[in-house]
Image (spheres, grey):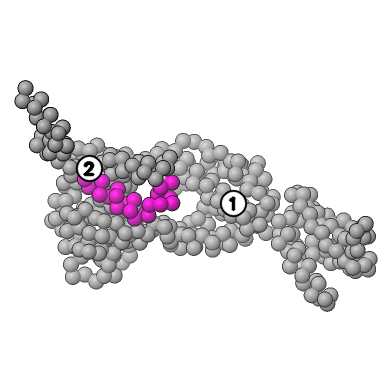
Amino acid sequence: MTQRLRNRLLKTRLEPWLALCENGIVQIYGPYPPSQGRTRWRLQVYDPATQRKISVTAANRDDALKLLAQLEQEVKSAKPKTVHEVLEEFLEYKRSVLSKEHFVLQLGMKLRQLIPDVTIQSITPQKAESYYLAETRRVGKYGVLKPATHHLCLRRAKEFFAWLVRRGLATSNPFSGVEPIGRVNTGKLQPRESEAKTLDALLFAKADAGDEGALALLVQLYLGCRPSEVLALTVGCCEAEATRIYVPGTKTKNARRKLELYPPVAALVQRHCAGRPVRERLFAANLPKQPSANWMYKRLHRYCDEIRIPRICPHALRGLHSSLALAAGATTHNVAQALGHANFSTTARHYASPESVANGRAKNFAAAFHAATPSVEELLGRLPEALRAQVLAEMKR
């Protein structure tokens, strides 16, 4: 092996190791002569900050001295990787998970805001705690950050460093022990069932009269989609006379799914699609680009004011969808019980496809929302014959 090749191999081995070391604190020990059972001279590079060490060997003393000079040069010229430098690699990885470049750029901005551009190994648990504490006090566009906002930043930082550890770019996750501060307000204000039915009737009437904002909100209510997902729908996403809707998904690639739409809403959507190009946006097609969720916020608030109920946000319709679907019956529990699972999360994660779960919820929602009170005759008709005869005999007394 030539000296040039040996130098290149040494550099390849040392570079990633030195990238995790702090400038000026790496120590080199040796060269040590061969000990019992060994035939080669040995040098050791040691990092006191992380207590990591790496050993390299040479055939004889002269080669070991040359190796020592090379090691000193490598350590001197080594440049430890900084947070913002490896952040670019992390964002490239996230591009395979997140569906839009906008989300990747937003993630990068939030992490740069939280963590300064210092060397990776210089971030201790104490420094990580101080970075997060500063984030909880940061003033944003609408005042001091809400707990939900800085909790999300902390989760992002933990995910980032966990990825660095898996890649061998960090020796530990300094954010792993940082506890979130403050209490998050969970859930959105949902209308009472009577208010929801009044709103539903208004949306149907307005959608039937050609109001596409009302129709967009009906689609969200009956499918449980995000506002951005509804606004991203195209005419081509509507299949089988709009009874099946393909949702491209706006957050992660796992959000892509095909859902069944309640037939009366599907009929209105099908009419809205008639004669239009398949690639045209289903809603707000007159605008040059897809509008923000505010497009649906404004219309929903106007409808709430019209029927004099408290204003709700479009995300509350997602919550209402889930609440009424679950109230329609314990189907998820029954499936989990049949498979012997302690809870439905295992069933959904390993057995039920996301589409089958979502379609079951959509059907349950529509059934709960439009179920009529059964008559006495209908209730009696559901009983076994022997029990029905017994009940009828008791009723005649």
Q: Residue at x 47, y 45 (%)?
A: 149
Residue 70 visible in this rendered orientation of the protein: yes
Q: Residue at x 39, y 57 (%)?
A: 255
Which residue is situated farthest in the top direction here?
Answer: 397
Pointer 2 local density, CA inside 10 Å: few below 14, some 14–19, many at least 20: some
Magenta region includes residue 356: yes
Residue 294 visible in this rendered orientation of the protein: no
What is the secondary structure assignment of the residue under circle 2? helix
- Secondary structure mostly seen in magenta is helix
Magenta region includes residue 348: yes
Left or right? Give the position of 25 relative to 145: right
Location of residue 365 in the rendering, given as x and y in whole percent from the top left corner: 25, 46
Left or right? Give the position of 313 relative to 384: right
Pointer 1 local density, CA inside 10 Å: few below 14, some 14–19, many at least 20: many
Left or right? Give the position of 5 relative to 293: right
In-front residue for pair 89/301: 89
**Residue kind at label 2, given as amino acid type:** Ala
274 lies above or below 162: below
Dividing the picture into quarters, in which one does residue 42 lie?
A: bottom right
What is the secondary structure assignment of the residue under circle 1? helix
Quadrant assignment for the C terminus: top left
Identify residue for label 1: 162
Location of residue 248 in the rendering, given as x and y in whole percent from the top left corner: 35, 61
**Residue kind at label 1, given as amino acid type:** Ala
Identify residue for label 2: 368
Q: Residue at x 21, y 70 (%)?
A: 276
